[in-house]
Image (spheres, grey):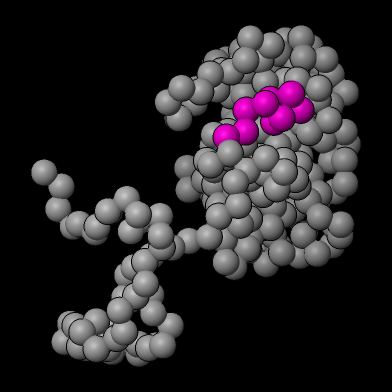
Amino acid sequence: MGIDEAGRGPVLGPMVYGCAIVKADGLANLDSIGVNDSKALTDAKRREIFAKMEELIASVDPKQILTYSLRIVHPRTISAQMQRRVKQSLNEISHLCAISLIEKALQNGICISEVFVDLVGNKEEVYQTFLNERFPSLKITVSKKADAIFRIVGAASIVAKVTRDDKLAEWVFDEIGFFAPERGLGSGYPSDPITKQFIRTMVDPIFGYPSLVRFSWKTVERVLEKKAIKYTWDSSSSLLDSSKQFTLTELWTKASVTKHCQTKKKYRRHSFFTERGLSNTTELS
C-alpha cells in the first residue's frame, strides 16, 4: 500500500489524499505501465498511466489486482480547521487522512503487509513512530520523496494528482453568482498568474471569497487585509454580557437566565440599528 497527496500548497481547491494497493507479485505491472512520481510526469502522461491503472483494476487476472482509494478534504474544511480556536495544522489534517485510508482498507478486509507513506513534516522517524503506534501489526515505511522511490507511492501520487486537477477544473461554486473565469482557475498555487488574478479580482469586501478559497493562507489574509471592510461584532443579546459568568448548572436553569436578563443594565445598541428603527424578532411570517 502506498499513500501520497496532491494539493497541500495551493490556495484554491481541495487537498486530495490517495492510496494505491497492489498484490506483492503485481508490482512489476506498475513498472510496465510507466508509474512514477506524478511531479515528474506531464499532465497527459499522468492521465495515460491513470487510464492503464483503471484497466488493471478491471482485469480479472488475479496477479494484476490493483485498487485505490481517495480522501478529499474540501477547502472549507481546511479553512475551518486551521482557523478554529484550537487550530489544527495542515500536517495534522494530513496525518488523519493517511490514518483514514489505512483504516478503510483494513475495514474492507484487505490484507495489508506493508505501507509506504510520503513524508509529511520534517522528521521521518516521528511520523513513522506515530503511524506504527496506531497500526502496530503493519510494517510501515515513511520516507521523503517516497513517490519517486517506491512505485506503489508513485501510483498513489498519480491517483491523487489527477483527481485533484479534475476537481479544480470542474469546480461548481456553492455560492450563487460565482463562476470560474473564462481563463479558468489555474493550478490553484499562489504563484500561478491565473490563480493570482482570481485572488486579486474575486474578493468581496464583505464576504471575502467563495469556499473554493483557503482563507487560512497568508496570500488570502493579505488581500483581505487590504480590500475587505474592517468590522466588529455587535449584539444586543443579554447573554453576551461579560459582567455575569454563568456556571454550567446555571446555564441549564431557565430561572437563572431569566433573572439575569431582568436585572442587568439595558444594553446600548449600535447606532446602525437604532437609526434605522430595527428591532429584534424571534418569529418570521
Quarter occupied by the N terminus: top right
* Residue 181 lies in quadrant: top right
* Residue 16 lies in quadrant: top right
* Residue 231 lies in quadrant: bottom right
- x, y percent for residue 28: 79, 23
Residue at 77% x, 60% y is: 127
Q: As rendered, which of 240 and 89 lies closer to the eye? A: 240
> Does the rendering let one see residue 119?
yes
Q: As rendered, which of 71 and 220 lies closer to the eye? A: 220
- x, y percent for residue 126: 80, 64
> Does the rendering let one see residue 16?
no
Q: What is the residue that sits farthest to the left in this orientation? A: 285
Q: As rendered, which of 39 and 266 lies closer to the eye? A: 266
- x, y percent for residue 233: 48, 61
For the stretch drawn in magenta, the main secondary structure is: helix
- x, y percent for residue 253: 20, 85
Residue 118 shown left or right of residue 253 in the figure:
right
Q: Is residue 226 magenta?
A: no
Residue 190 shown left or right of residue 15 in the figure:
right
Residue at 60% x, 52% y is: 230
Residue 106 shown left or right of residue 248 in the figure:
right
Segment colored magenta: 195-204
Residue 189 shown left or right of residue 112 in the figure:
right
Residue at 81% x, 25% y is: 192
Q: Is residue 201 magenta?
A: yes
